[in-house]
Amino acid sequence: MKTHTSQPDTFLSARWDCSQEILSYGPITNPRVLEAFLLTPREEFCRNPRRAYENAAMPIGYGQTISGPNLVARMTDALNPQPDQRVLEVGTGSGYQSAVLSELSNHVFSVEIVEALARETDRIYRSQWDRFPEYRNVWRKVDDGYFGWPQFAPFDRIIVTCGIDHIPPELLRELAPEGIMVIPVGPPSGQTILRIVKHVMPDGSVRLDREDIYHGSTVIFVPFTSRSGLHTQ
């Protein structure tokens, strides 16, 4: 890593060690995902850089968190984004997830509902543009991600980084045929992370294939909020 990157080596060893810890929990099926993890300076997005490579969610202010490295890697692996695919992220948060996605896709769109957090994360992105020009490919806006981003739909991949008790209908509509959505679904006490593949049948009907990527284990995410409270079914 020290040979092939111009990044300062202060955090490179910690990032490498973290990648090995991730692999100890199980394989990453797409090598490009692991490479994206190794390229992305999590310390720039984690509000406490000294703890950036601890395998845990951490607060970033405004009642939000940055997901732990293993969770980000697993969800990204399940999403399997390709370079020319359009990827929508619901919940920009720290900016870290969309930074990882920008190493995998040239077309990343991210929506954040907390305006002050979005402004803070925008400053982080701009500070990194010279070092990571791929971050310029992350389109961002402040809005309610429940309704996606219709202007740029359909999306080949959609990732949701907040917990909700149902799958938002608009996001399903904006998901392209054979597209993949990764979303935490369940009550506030813990969500199941679903990988959903959308199939459109010859008669126009839609079939959704669902897979629990953690095979029964649940994870607690920050809630999927609206302008007036929580999105609930």
Image (spheres, helix red, strand yellow):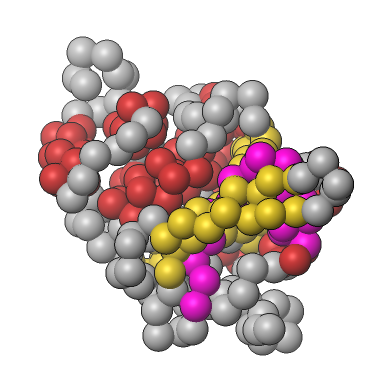
Picture quadrant where residue 10 is located: top left
- Picture coordinates of residue 155, whole percent (x, y): 71, 42
For residue 50, side relative to residue 105 (left or right): left
Residue 101 can be seen, yes or no: yes
Note whether 86 is above or below 76 in the view shown: above
Q: Is residue 39 visible?
A: no
Question: For residue 179: magenta?
Answer: yes
Query: Which residue occupies the foreground of this view, 101 or 185?
Result: 185
- Residue 47 percent coordinates (x, y): 36, 58
Q: Position of residue 164 (x, y in %)?
A: 57, 75
Image label count: 0
Residue at 36 percent across and 49 percent down: it is 74
- Residue lying at the far front in this picture: please name it: 203
**Residue shown at 30% from the left, 51% from the top:** 69
Q: Is residue 54 left or right of residue 103?
A: left
Residue situated in front as seen by the camera: 65 or 180: 180
Instruction: Name which residue lies at 72% across and 58% down.
Output: 171
Quadrant containing the N terminus is top left
What residue sits 81% from the left and 53% below the top?
205
In the rendered image, residue 178 lying in the magenta stretch gets the answer yes
Range covered by the magenta-colored residues: 170-186
Say which quadrant the C terminus sits in.
bottom right
**Where is residue 154 drawn, in percent x and y?**
78, 42
Q: Residue furthest top?
A: 3
Prevalent SS, magenta region:
strand
